[in-house]
């Protein structure tokens, strides 16, 4: 037990330090390349923190376990929006740019709706639909790099990281996030089993938190460093990667059945996206404030309560 507690603490420490290094490195790359922090968060950080979901879903697809591929993405996107965005916006209200309002958030809404419609009306995500998702993903990433306005650096040269230093920080940070998250999950699961906790409880609590830990830690650190666009890019990027890239690639491997999906899970997924979308048009339209965050966290709490009740 003592060893597992030590490993748990070590995993959390790796996640925290990894998040800090990742944010610093990603910001350094953005400053050096003149690319917006949002795009860096959307691509490098979003992809990096989605690596655990990518591995889990592709492994499930290769083994013919569609439940794992679909459930992993549905659960991850719910946690990303309701829990992670909610917690981050409670720490520091998150600014929404005009581009976020007209391009990025509507895309998250659109692909989520498309994902649910494909799955519920066709009973699965076919290979053709998977290819469609991958094409939309490629077009969106190309569009972001091509048309997002470049940023002018306002920091002095002495404060800037060299490009190789920023890249190294990103790689080390991602390694710390993924390795620390895995260490946390393994040790927490071992402790829970020693205490006689059921497998279902472990899956809903520890494993769900563990797969979301990289995004959560990265966004909290970014918010604390007043890099809201990096945090928002990470969340939106992770959601877009999960549906377009991960589901798209998994469906190309094997069609993904929706047989195990229930309407509560899909309804909460759609509700989380609606709350994100509506934050652009109600009250303070240019910020996800603490009121928006409170609704998100309340919905997350209600969903968790339902999961526990339905065990």
Image: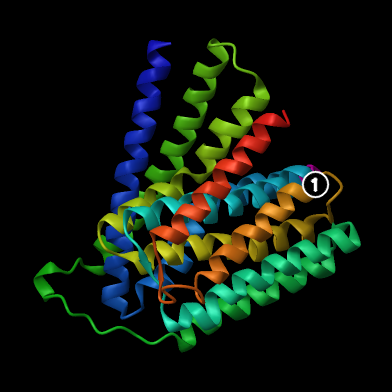
Q: Position of residue 239 (x, y in %)?
A: 58, 61
Is 266 positioned to the left or the right of 104 in the image? right
**Residue 107 lies in what quarter of the image?**
bottom right
Q: Residue at x 85, y 63 (%)?
A: 126
Q: Decide: is 125 above or below 10.
A: below
Position of the N terminus by quadrant? top left
Q: Where is residue 82 in the image (x, y as percent from the top left)?
A: 53, 53
Q: Give the range drawn in magenta.
A: 62-66
Q: Which residue is drawn at 52% across and 65% down?
A: 237
Is 204 positioned to the left or the right of 5 in the image? right
Q: Residue at x 53, y 47 (%)?
A: 298
Q: Decide: is 24 above or below 149.
A: above
Provide the residue designation for mark 1.
262
Colouring convention used in this rendered image of the protein = rainbow
Q: How crowded is mark 1: few (under 14 residues within 10 Å), some or many (20 or more)?
A: few
Residue 219 in view of the camera: no
Residue furthest out toward the front:
283
Residue 252 in view of the camera: yes
Question: Which of these two is toward me, 183 or 289?
Answer: 289
Is 260 positioned to the left or the right of 186 in the image? right
Question: Which of these two is toward me, 99 or 37?
Answer: 99
């Amino acid at each position: 037990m003592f060893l597992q507690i030590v490993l748990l603490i070590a995993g959390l420490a790796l996640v925290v330090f990894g998040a800090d290094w990742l944010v610093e490195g990603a910001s350094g790359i953005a400053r050096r390349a003149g690319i917006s922090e949002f795009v860096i968060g959307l691509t490098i950080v979003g992809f990096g923190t989605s690596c655990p979901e990518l591995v889990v879903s592709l492994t499930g697809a290769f083994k013919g376990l569609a439940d794992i591929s679909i459930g992993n993405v549905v659960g991850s996107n719910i946690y990303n929006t309701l829990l992670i965005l909610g917690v981050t916006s409670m720490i520091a209200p998150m600014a929404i740019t005009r581009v976020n309002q007209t391009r990025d958030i509507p895309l998250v809404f659109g692909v989520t709706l498309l994902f649910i419609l494909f799955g519920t009306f066709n009973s699965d995500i076919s290979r053709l639909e998977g290819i469609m998702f991958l094409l939309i993903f490629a077009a969106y990433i190309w569009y972001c790099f091509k048309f997002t306005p470049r940023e002018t650096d306002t920091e002095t040269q002495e404060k800037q990281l060299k490009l190789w230093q920023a890249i190294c920080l990103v790689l080390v940070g991602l390694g710390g996030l993924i390795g620390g998250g895995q260490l946390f999950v393994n040790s927490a699961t071992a402790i829970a089993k020693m205490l006689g906790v059921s497998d279902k409880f472990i899956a809903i609590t520890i494993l769900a938190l563990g797969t979301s830990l990289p995004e959560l830690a990265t966004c909290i650190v970014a918010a604390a460093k007043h890099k809201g666009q990096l945090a928002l890019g990470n969340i939106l990027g992770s959601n877009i990667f999960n549906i377009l890239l991960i589901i798209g690639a998994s469906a190309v491997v094997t069609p993904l059945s929706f047989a195990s999906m229930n309407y509560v899970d899909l309804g909460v997924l759609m509700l989380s996206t609606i709350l994100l979308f509506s934050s652009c048009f109600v009250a303070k339209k240019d910020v996800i404030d603490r009121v928006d965050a409170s609704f998100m966290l309340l919905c997350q709490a209600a969903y968790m309560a339902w999961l526990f009740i339905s065990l």
